[in-house]
Image: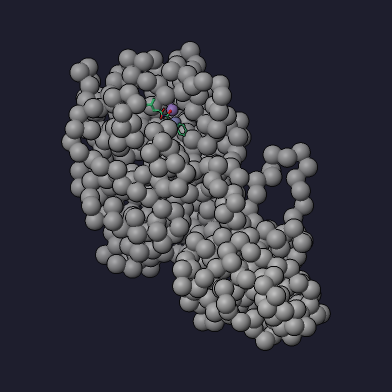
Amino acid sequence: MIQVHLAKGRGKSELTVVCLHEKERVPAWVNTATQGAAARAKKLGDFAAKTKETLLLYGDASHPRVLLVGLGARKTSSPERVRRAVGRAIRHARKLNARTVLLSAPNPRPKGPEFAQIAARAAILADYSFDECKGKSPKRALMKVSIEVEGASAATIRESVCVAEGTNLARDLGNRPGNVGTPTHLANEAKRLGKKHGFRVKILLPADIKRLGMGGLIGVAKGSAEPARFIEMEWSPKKVNRKAGTLCLVGKGLTFDSGGISIKPAANMWDMKFDKCGGCAVIGAMSAIAAAKLPIRVVALVPATENMPGAAANKPGDVLTALNGKTIEVLNTDAEGRLILADALAYSARFKPDVILDFATLTGAVMIALGDVRAAVMGNDEALLKAVRAAGDDAGERVWPLPMDEEYGEQVKSSVADVKNLGKGRLAGSIAAGWFLRNFVPEGPSWVHVDIAGVAWNGDVSKGYVAKGATGFGVALAYAYAKARSQA
Ligand code: BES
Ligand code: MN
Ligand code: ZN
């Protein structure tokens, strides 16, 4: 457990973290606390405040331990650098079993309020680890972090806490193995969170899903013994900016993807418990948005199911009818994400959204294109694509657009049905998937699809604030977009 808040003075702390840029002077109070050791270390060149550099010193009764943390050259500093530095500091604090941490930056860049916002989120992300499956889960004491930078406000720190906790929640849900993190489990979690944060939750059961005619979701769920769920969440605050309209978030909640009859190879199949990370991100984002009480109506939809090769499973060549009446030829049962998203996108029409953002671990191909650095975005509106990119940069969850020429759309037309769930094999697989989805986006709203298959898990742990397993990618981006929109 970790709590982050605004420092009320310097007081006493078991660990005092001082973030410094190269060539920056050690503040007088740090020198006093360390009896001059901090300045001497700088003078001797033992600590030059380069990125990744840290130095632990011992001080007086109020500041028994002082950790100097390098931020690199001030000129070139960035939010990402701050996240990494703070992340490293918090992990160090955890190793030292520090229960109280003072986090200070005498000359922050970006300036105080923004620095505090970035640092607060990074601290909570850095302290995450997934231990609940261990027989004896390690004991972790409560760590209280006070942030001391000039101009920081308690309100922005509180907002960061909402976003970071939403991300860690998405990580928890994503990390749960397939036998625990079932569609039923996701639905129960959504209900619990709705009660906690004050958003409405409605769960559609298999009978409802059939009655409505969600052929894609039914088709994928047929091969599994785990019943499907369709999770609907709505944050409709009293205090709302009417101009912001309705934002709809959609997330792929595929709790285990074996591939179905078009079964995947055994190696790495275990990773397919992470195929629900889009849905988890959307649940985490809803929690963050409601916890922070953003003044915008947000609807979130998560179709949740397993993809298994049971006796009743989808067969290659089967034709399904989606909720909007379009028919789909299933050529590969492993291209299942787009089948369940088709129904969710079509279902969103009933909320008359202005903007739809969907998050999905949709294609292996996106990993070839962009690796684990950026997610891919595709959409039907340049202005929205730009806004999503800006939100991603702001949140430190970066995206990059893929082209949507009509020719790619041709690839998913079927000679048997309206569309087919396979494009030209290995060619432009992510774009073919994006075009497939586009066929199910209601008339009217702007839409962006975020393919997070490359960034949803196994992130770069050395960054300091990225944990093993699920990353929670998408929560901060969706929050940043919703926030910007709520201020429009
Ligand atoms: N969930 C996978 C995508 C995926 C694969 C994510 C590997 C991360 C790592 C998705 O359902 C899938 O299997 N996609 C297929 C589509 C293909 C059959 C057209 C893929 O990418 O191989
Ligand atoms: Mn698949
Ligand atoms: Zn999948």
Q: Can residue 343 be seen at all in this image of the molecule?
A: no
Rendered position, 165 above or below 155: above
Rendered position, 154 above or below 452: below
Foreground pick, 205 / 222: 222
> Viewed as shown, does residue 382 lie left or right of 4?
left
Foreground pick, 373 / 318: 373
Q: At 33% across and 55% down in the image, what residue appears?
A: 388
Q: At 45% across and 47% down in the image, what residue appears?
A: 373
Q: At 73% across and 40% down in the image, what residue appears?
A: 134
Horizontal and vertical percent position of residue 303: 42, 36
Horizontal and vertical percent position of residue 252: 42, 38
Residue 429 image-quadrant placement: top left
Horizontal and vertical percent position of residue 246: 31, 55
Image quarter for ligand 2 equals top left
Give the quadrant of the N terminus.
Answer: bottom right
> Viewed as shown, does residue 314 lie left or right of 34?
left
Rendered position, 23 above or below 331: below
Foreground pick, 394 / 420: 394
Rendered position, 385 above or below 144: above
Residue 335 image-quadrant placement: top left
Residue at the limit of the structure toward the top, as seen here: 311
Horizontal and vertical percent position of residue 284: 50, 51
Q: Identify the colour scheme used.
A: one colour
> Viewed as shown, does residue 202 lie left or right of 341?
right
Residue at the limit of the structure toward the front, as seen here: 44
Give the quadrant of the C terminus.
Answer: bottom left
> Viewed as shown, does residue 105 lie left or right of 437?
right
Q: At 36% across and 15% down in the image, what residue appears?
A: 316
